[in-house]
Structure formats: structure tokens, C-alpha cells
Image (cartoon, grey):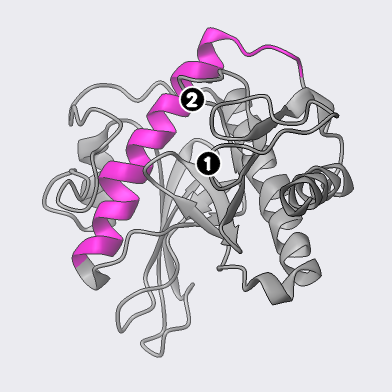
Amino acid sequence: MNQNTSVDDSFVRTRAALHAVAEHVLAAARYRATGRIGLTVAPGGFGTPPFGDEGRTIAVDGTDLVVSVGLGDGTPGAEVTRAPLRTLAAAAALAGLPAPGGPAEIYRLNTPCDPDAPLAVDAGAARRIGDWYALGDAALRRWRTEIPDDEPTAVTLWPEHADVAIRAADINYGASPGDEYLARPYLYVGPPAPPPASPEGFWNAPFGAYLTWDKVHSVADAVDFFRQGRRLVRG
């Protein structure tokens, strides 16, 4: 994946808007129905796993919110409604929520909930974020198959930080679209603290190590990064 080294203001605004939708609409809807908040990478972005008797899914695809209602047997896709992301209030209404609002009783929310504020979602930036999630998801799924003895968790997109991640043998592996710590999207390896010393200088962050997206050109590159982190943790 070839990406610019830096990100512009439209990318940062889009990332913040999509993060707000993840917390205040998608995670809110899934939590209201199931008591769970985890999301998943989906075509063009991210969404909920199917939930409820009708197999409902709610997803962000580029600049749109897509609600799919299933056949009543847990199979999604019988009825699909799509609308541009305009405001959190409009997105919540389409998702079947009485109002937007993340599950604050579960964790400290990281985005504001302003129901009627316009969502600044740029199509190009949304596409780049969706592509990054897809690469991270594919890499984590491949990495899981290499380390079954580490008992890796399922690949999950967590609404708290909008990162897609797994945990395996006390090590966190993931792909972030960027945050306050680092504006650019990045991969990370988070070992038990403090990070172990290494002659390679691999550990470059308080949480462990990161590799920015301009250095990641393929799923294989991402898996190599995860593999190196695990090797160094294990000594």
C-alpha cells in the first residue's frame, strides 16, 4: 500500500467523523441489542457483526451508512438501506436508535457526540481509511494462523480507538488509522510493559513499537512487522 507520508486536514477530519460514527452509532446500536461493542472490518470501511433475530448489520461504506436487515435466520442482506453520512442524529435514526450516544458505561468515550453537527467525511480520505483497515484486517488474520499456540483473540475493530487488533500471549497487535499520538495510520506491537530492549531499535513508542503506513506496502510487510515484534519479545 503506497501512501503519502503525511496526512492532511481532510483526512484528520474524516477520521474523527468516522470514529464518532463508530462510537455513537455502530457500537451504540450493537451494545443496545447485545451488550457487546466490538466491530469488524467491512467492505469500504467497518461495521457491526450481524445481531438480533433478523441478522441486522450497520456499516460505514466510504461516505455512506448502510443498514442491512436479514432474513430472520441470522442471514444478513435481505433488505438494504443506504444514505450519505450527514449527522450523527440522521445516522442514528437510520440505524434504529432513538438518539446517538456511545456506551459510556463501558468505557470513556473518545469522541464528542454532537447530534446535529455536520460530519466532515471526505470521499478520498474515507477510501484510504477503508483500504488501511482492509490491509490491517488481512494481515492480522494471516498472523493469527501463524501463532495458534499463542491463543490469539478474534480480529476486532474496537470503537474506543478505532483500531483493528488482536491480543495473543499478552501481546497486542493492530492497525490504527492514526490518533493524537501519531497522526498517520500505523501498525503497532504492544508487549507487556515496559518494552524490552533490542539492538535493532525496534521499540520506538511508550506502548511498544509502530510502523507508519508509508512503510507498509503489502500484507506481507505487515505480518513481517508483527513477526519481528513477537521474536524480540520472546528474546
List the residue tagged with mark 1. 193
Looking at the rendered structure, the kind of residue marked 1 is Ala
Q: Is 6 colored magenta in this rendering?
A: yes
Q: Residue 186: where, in percent of width, then height?
A: 66, 31
Q: Is 30 colored magenta in this rendering?
A: yes
Which region shows up in magenta? 4-32
Q: Is residue 26 visible?
A: yes
> Which type of secondary structure does the marked residue at label 1 adopt?
loop
Closer to the camera in the image, 225 or 197: 197
Name the N-terminal-most of marks 1 and 2. 2
Left or right: 108, with 19 as reference point: left
Q: Main secondary structure of the magenta part?
A: helix
Q: Which mark is residue 179?
A: 2
> Which type of secondary structure does the marked residue at label 2 adopt?
loop
Q: Residue 58: where, in percent of width, then height?
A: 39, 58
Looking at the rendered structure, the kind of residue marked 2 is Asp
75 shown above or below 189:
below
How far is mark 1 from mark 2, CA to CA? 21 Å
Residue drawn 29% across and 22% down? 118
Q: Residues within 10 Å of mark 1 (few under 14, many from 20)?
A: few
Q: Quadrant of residue 19?
A: top left
